[in-house]
C-alpha cells in the first residue's frame, strides 16, 4: 500500500460526497462536503440529530438551509488508511442556547446520527467502512 493507492481506495467515497455536495445539490440526502482527506457532514431542518428541532438554520451560499454537524478524516497507520476519525460540533445548537449551558462537542446523539450518515455514504460507494474512532 502507498499513500496514492490508499487515496484511490477512498476515491469512490469522495466522488459520491462531491456529487452529494450540500453547496450545489438540493437533494435531501446531499449533506456532504468533500475534502482531500475526508469530508464534512451538514444537517438540515429535515435531517438532523435529535435535539436540533428548534435550531434556526440558514441557507447562505448552500443549496438549502443547513448547519455544520461533523468532520470525518482518514485515520492512518503508516501508509494505510485503517480507520476514520469523527468529530462533531453543534455550533448552531450551542449558539441557540445560552452560552455555557449546553455542551456541543461530540454529543452522543450527534455521534450516532453522523455514524449513520457515514455508513450510508460508504454503502452507496461500495467501499468497506473502516472502524470509526471519535476524536476528542
Image (cartoon, rainbow, N blue to C red):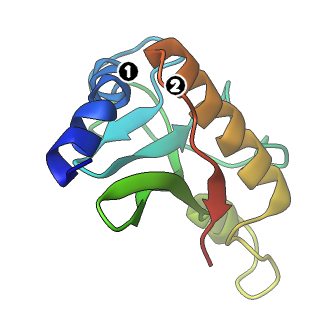
Q: Is residue 106 visible?
A: yes
Distance from Cα at disc 1 to Cα at disc 2: 9 Å
Dot 1 falls on a residue whose secondary structure is loop
Mark 2 nearby-residue class (10 Å; few <14, some 14–19, many ≥20): many
Q: Residues within 10 Å of mark 1 (few under 14, many from 20)?
A: many
From the image, tell me which residue sits under label 1. Answer: 20
Give the camera-side residue of 2 and 7: 2
At 53% from the left and 54% from the top, the residue drawn is 83
Using the image, tell me which numbered label, if any, was put on residue 101. none
Residue receiving disc 2: 121
Q: Position of residue 67 (x, y in %)?
A: 52, 47
Do residues under tags 1 and 2 come within 8 Å of each other at their CB atoms? yes
Choose top left, top right, bottom left or bottom right for residue 125.
top left
Tell me which residue sits at (34%, 39%) in the image.
Answer: 33
In the displayed structure image, the side of residue 49 where residue 24 appears, left or right? left
Image coordinates for residue 112, horizontal then vertical, percent: 78, 46
Amino acid at each position: 500500500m502507498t499513500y496514492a493507492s490508499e487515496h484511490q481506495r477512498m476515491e469512490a467515497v469522495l466522488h459520491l460526497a462531491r456529487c452529494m455536495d450540500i453547496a450545489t445539490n438540493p437533494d435531501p440526502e446531499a449533506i456532504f462536503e468533500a475534502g482531500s482527506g475526508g469530508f464534512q457532514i451538514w444537517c438540515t431542518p429535515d435531517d438532523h440529530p435529535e435535539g436540533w428541532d428548534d435550531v434556526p438554520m440558514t441557507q447562505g451560499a448552500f443549496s438549502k438551509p443547513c448547519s455544520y454537524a461533523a468532520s470525518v478524516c482518514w485515520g492512518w497507520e503508516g501508509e494505510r488508511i485503517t480507520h476514520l476519525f469523527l468529530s462533531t460540533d453543534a455550533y448552531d445548537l450551542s449558539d441557540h442556547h445560552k452560552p455555557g449551558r449546553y455542551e456541543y462537542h461530540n454529543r452522543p446523539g450527534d455521534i450516532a446520527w453522523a455514524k449513520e450518515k457515514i455508513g450510508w455514504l460508504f454503502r452507496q460507494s461500495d467501499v468497506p467502512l473502516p472502524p470509526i474512532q471519535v476524536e476528542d
